[in-house]
Image: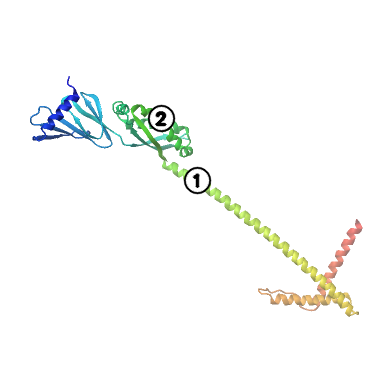
C-alpha cells in the first residue's frame, strides 16, 4: 500500500518543478457537487484534482468509498489515483423550515398551524459525520417530528385556547426536536408557531360572536346611561318642584302677613269700617292686579273671566262659604270623637 500523504507531497513537488510546462486543464462537473479542476501535465502519468469549498459549507471527501476527512472552506487536493472524490457537502448556515400542519382541536374544529423551525449542523467532527452518514433527509425528518408533536398536542386544546397557548406548543415542539435531532448532529435554534388559521367559516362565526357580545355590552351600557339620565331628571324635577312649592308657600305666607297688617292698620285709621269691607277691597285690588298681569304677560292666551265688580264679591262669598263649611266639618269630626 502507498502512503497517501507521501504521495501527495511527491505529486506537489512534481507539479512545482513542471509549473512552466504546458498544461491541459479539463473541467469536470458533478451535480450537485462543486466543480473539480483536473491538472494533467504532459510528462506525467497521474492526474491531480482540487476542489474549492465555498464559505459556509463543509465538503465530505471519501477515499475508496470510505470517509477520509472534512474539507473546510478553501482549496483542497483530491487525488483520483487514490480513488478520492467529493461525496457531498454540509451547510454550516442556519437553515429555516416552515411546516403547515392541519389538525383538529378538542371542540372538533380543523385548523392549519404553521410551525417555523431554525436549525443548523453542529461543528464537531463526530456530529458532522452523524449528520452526513446517519440521516438521509434532515428536512423530512424534522417535518415528521413536527407533525407528530402538533397532532398529539392540539387535539387536547379548545380552539380559543390554541391562540393563547401557542408558546407552549412551540416549546413542546422544540424540546421534542432537540431530543431527536441531536443524535443526528443537528441543533434546534428556535421553533415558532407563526400562524393559526381555522376555516374561513369558523373565522366568520367567531367574528359574529364577538360582534354580538360587544353589541350586548354596548346596549347594556346605553340602557344604564339612559336610566341614569331619567333618574337624574326625576331628581332634578322633584328638587325643582320642592323649591317651587317652598317659594309659593313663603309667598302666600308673606301675602297673608301683609293682608293682616293692612287690615289692622286700616282699622286703626278708620274706625267705622269692618274687617269684611277691608277684605273685599283688598280682594278687589288683587283681582285687578291679576288681570293686569295676565294681560301684560308674553305669550298669553285668551281667558274668559267675569269682569264686573260684582265678581269680586262673589269670589269673596265663595271663599268665606268654603272656610265656614270647613270649620263646621272639623268641629263635627272633633265632637264625634
Q: Decide: marks 1, 2 in contact (CB < 8 A)? A: no
- Residue 156: percent from left, percent from top: 47, 32
Residue at 72% x, 63% y: name it: 243
Residue at 80% x, 68% y: name it: 253
Structural crowding at the residue carrying mark 1, measured as other residues with C-alpha within 10 Å and reported as few (<14), some (14–19) or many (≥20): few
Camera-nearest label, 1 or 2: 2
Residue ID for mark 1:
210
Residues 307 and 66: in front is 66
- Which quarter shows the C terminus? bottom right
Structural crowding at the residue carrying mark 2, measured as other residues with C-alpha within 10 Å and reported as few (<14), some (14–19) or many (≥20): some
Q: Is 158 located above or below residue 230 in the figure?
A: above
Q: Is residue 328 left or right of residue 193?
A: right
Residues 218 and 331: in front is 218
Residue at 18% x, 22% y: name it: 3
Q: Is residue 247 left or right of residue 53?
A: right
- Residue 310: percent from left, percent from top: 81, 77
Q: Is 10 located above or below residue 233 in the figure?
A: above
Residues 247 and 333: in front is 247
Instruction: Determine which quarter of the picture holds residue 23.
Output: top left
Residue ID for mark 2:
176
Amino acid at each position: 500500500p502507498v502512503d497517501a500523504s507521501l504521495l501527495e507531497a511527491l505529486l506537489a513537488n512534481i507539479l512545482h518543478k513542471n509549473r512552466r510546462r504546458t498544461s491541459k486543464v479539463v473541467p469536470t462537473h458533478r451535480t450537485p457537487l462543486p466543480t473539480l479542476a483536473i491538472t494533467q501535465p504532459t510528462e506525467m502519468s497521474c492526474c491531480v484534482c482540487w476542489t474549492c469549498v465555498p464559505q459556509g459549507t463543509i465538503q465530505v471527501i471519501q477515499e475508496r468509498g470510505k470517509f477520509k476527512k472534512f474539507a473546510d472552506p478553501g482549496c483542497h487536493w483530491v487525488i483520483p489515483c487514490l480513488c478520492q472524490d467529493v461525496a457531498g457537502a454540509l451547510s454550516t448556515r442556519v437553515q429555516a423550515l416552515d411546516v403547515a400542519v392541519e389538525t383538529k382541536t378538542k371542540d372538533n374544529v380543523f385548523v392549519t398551524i404553521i410551525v417555523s423551525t431554525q436549525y443548523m449542523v453542529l461543528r464537531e467532527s463526530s456530529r458532522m459525520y452523524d449528520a452526513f452518514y446517519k440521516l438521509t433527509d434532515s428536512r423530512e425528518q424534522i417535518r415528521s417530528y413536527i407533525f407528530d408533536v402538533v397532532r398529539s398536542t392540539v387535539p387536547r386544546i379548545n380552539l380559543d385556547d390554541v391562540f393563547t397557548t401557542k408558546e407552549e406548543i412551540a416549546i413542546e415542539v422544540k424540546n421534542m426536536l432537540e431530543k431527536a435531532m441531536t443524535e443526528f448532529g443537528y441543533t434546534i435554534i428556535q421553533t415558532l408557531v407563526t400562524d393559526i388559521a381555522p376555516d374561513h367559516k369558523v373565522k366568520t362565526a367567531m367574528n359574529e360572536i364577538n360582534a354580538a357580545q360587544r353589541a350586548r355590552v354596548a346596549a347594556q351600557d346605553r340602557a344604564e346611561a339612559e336610566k341614569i339620565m331619567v333618574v337624574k331628571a326625576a331628581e332634578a324635577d322633584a328638587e325643582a318642584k320642592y323649591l317651587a312649592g317652598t317659594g309659593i308657600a313663603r309667598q302666600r305666607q308673606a301675602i297673608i302677613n301683609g293682608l293682616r297688617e293692612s287690615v289692622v292698620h286700616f282699622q286703626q285709621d278708620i274706625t267705622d269700617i269692618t274687617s269684611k269691607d277691608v277684605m273685599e277691597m283688598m280682594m278687589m285690588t288683587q283681582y285687578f292686579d291679576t288681570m293686569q298681569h295676565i294681560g301684560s304677560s308674553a305669550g298669553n292666551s285668551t281667558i274668559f273671566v267675569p269682569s264686573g265688580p260684582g265678581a269680586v264679591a262673589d269670589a269673596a262669598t265663595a271663599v268665606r262659604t268654603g272656610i265656614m263649611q270647613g270649620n263646621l266639618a272639623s268641629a263635627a269630626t272633633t265632637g264625634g270623637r
